[in-house]
């Protein structure tokens, strides 16, 4: 068995593994895809002390750093269930079971897609999911935000300070965002809100986004918006489906509940990053959370003898 088994190989999981391995304990990472969401990212400008990098480059340095500490890295394996019998057991979809004294869950999250033509083709070429990350790339341009919930209206307010104009496109005939956010958005001179609008297509010129089409659900008419960027804000889904029915408490959104040391409701199991209740989902925040969870797990190990 391992001392610490990390599930997930994104920023949170790699930071956790490095912090654990530096304590001289037997550490492994099991991940479906090493690098996580970072692998889908082009420009990264907010990873402090690195003014600019690109996702695959950052993922390669994460892997190099982890391997320097002799962490065992098992990739292309998906965790399917977790249980505890003294050791924590992580069952893999392949049928194998990994045993560890402590486990750190860092399975991240994924943005909910629109599932319309053009979205996939123009992802990172105008179709974006993170205003904190990609907002500045659209300085002085017109953009759309799809989704009128809290994250959509927050994104619109955030972007309105950087870009020329923001159009919020909401499917329903009301906005779900908190009243205070709606009021703030309406008070800004460069935000329009369109309701009862079903996004039908992302339109590009072959290399980048130039606009989008939506159906006016009250009339059935197809309308066009000329925009350089489309921020999809229809939900971030934590990769925690495999924990449903386990002893690990999740919120109603499926986020893993953690305390200030990264501990979950199951003793010996810690969690970090986008899969958890952490309010902000960013690389640097996930790494800090991974370090916290590893130190939390080490604290647990020195207090609880091996079974
Ligand atoms: P993830 O990066 O999601 O990693 C999760 C890991 O868990 C992966 O290795 C995955 O394969 C694995 N996994 C999932 N389920 C299982 C399972 N059942 N079994 C085994 N392994 C599993 N943040 C910034 O700070 N700056 C940016 O510029 C930026 N740009 C972004 C651009 C895009 C397009 C996207 C999608 C995100 C961006 N983010 C950015 C957000 C940032 O990437 C995330 O906050 C960060 O990657 C979260 O790290 P994580 O380790 O918690 O999860």
Image (cartoon, rainbow, N blue to C red):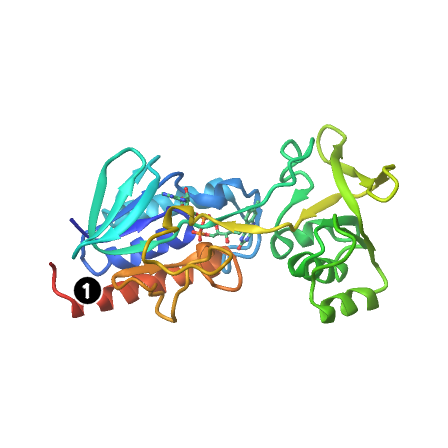
Residue extending farthest to the top is 206
Q: Is residue 257 left or right of residue 237?
A: left
Q: Residue at x 38, y 69 (%)?
A: 259
Count neighbours of disc 1 (C-alpha within 10 A) and say few if under 14, some if 14 to 19, many if 20 or more: some
Q: Residue at x 41, y 41 (%)?
A: 60
Q: Residue 260's x, y, as percent?
A: 38, 71
Q: Is residue 282 left or right of residue 5?
A: right
Q: Is residue 81 left or right of residue 234?
A: left
User: Picture quarter containing residue 42?
Assistant: top right
Q: Residue 180's x, y, as percent?
A: 73, 71
- The total of numbered circles placed on residues is 1
Q: Which residue is mark 1?
A: 301
Q: Residue at x 26, y 34 (%)?
A: 95
Q: Residue 23's x, y, as percent?
A: 21, 61
Q: Residue 28's x, y, as percent?
A: 25, 47
Looking at the figure, which quarter contains the C terminus? bottom left
Q: Secondary structure at mark 1?
A: helix
Indicate yes or no: mark 1 CB to ligand 1 under 8 Å.
no
Name above or below for residue 216 compared with residue 274. above
Front residue of 274/158: it is 274
Q: Residue at x 65, y 54 (%)?
A: 131
User: Picture quarter containing residue 104?
Assistant: bottom left
């Amino acid at each position: 068995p391992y001392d610490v088994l990390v599930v997930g190989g994104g920023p949170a999981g790699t930071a956790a593994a490095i912090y654990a391995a530096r304590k001289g304990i037997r550490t492994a990472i099991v991940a479906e895809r090493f690098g996580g969401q970072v692998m889908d990212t082009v420009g990264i400008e907010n990873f402090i002390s690195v003014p600019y990098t690109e996702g695959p480059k950052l993922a390669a340095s994460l892997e190099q750093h982890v391997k320097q500490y002799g962490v065992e890295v098992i990739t292309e394996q998906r965790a399917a269930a977790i249980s505890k019998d003294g050791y924590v057991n992580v069952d893999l979809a392949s049928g194998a079971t990994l045993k560890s004294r402590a486990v750190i869950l860092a399975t991240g999250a994924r943005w909910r897609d629109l599932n319309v033509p053009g979205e996939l083709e123009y992802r990172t070429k105008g179709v974006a999911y993170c205003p904190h990350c990609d907002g500045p790339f659209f300085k002085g341009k017109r953009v759309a935000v799809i989704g009128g919930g809290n994250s959509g209206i927050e994104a619109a307010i955030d972007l309105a300070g950087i870009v020329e104009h923001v159009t919020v496109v909401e499917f329903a005939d009301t906005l779900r965002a908190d009243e205070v956010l709606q009021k703030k958005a309406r008070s800004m001179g460069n935000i329009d809100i369109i309701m009862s609008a079903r996004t039908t297509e992302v339109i590009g010129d072959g290399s980048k986004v130039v606009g989008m089409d939506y159906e006016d659900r009250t009339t059935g008419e197809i309308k066009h918006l000329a925009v350089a960027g489309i921020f999809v804000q229809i939900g971030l889904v934590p990769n925690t489906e495999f924990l449903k029915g386990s002893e690990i408490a999740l919120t109603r959104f499926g986020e893993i509940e953690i305390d200030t040391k990264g501990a979950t409701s199951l003793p010996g199991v810690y969690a970090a990053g986008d899969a958890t209740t952490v309010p902000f989902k960013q690389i640097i925040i996930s790494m800090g959370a991974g370090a916290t969870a590893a130190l939390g797990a080490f604290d647990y190990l020195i207090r609880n003898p091996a079974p």
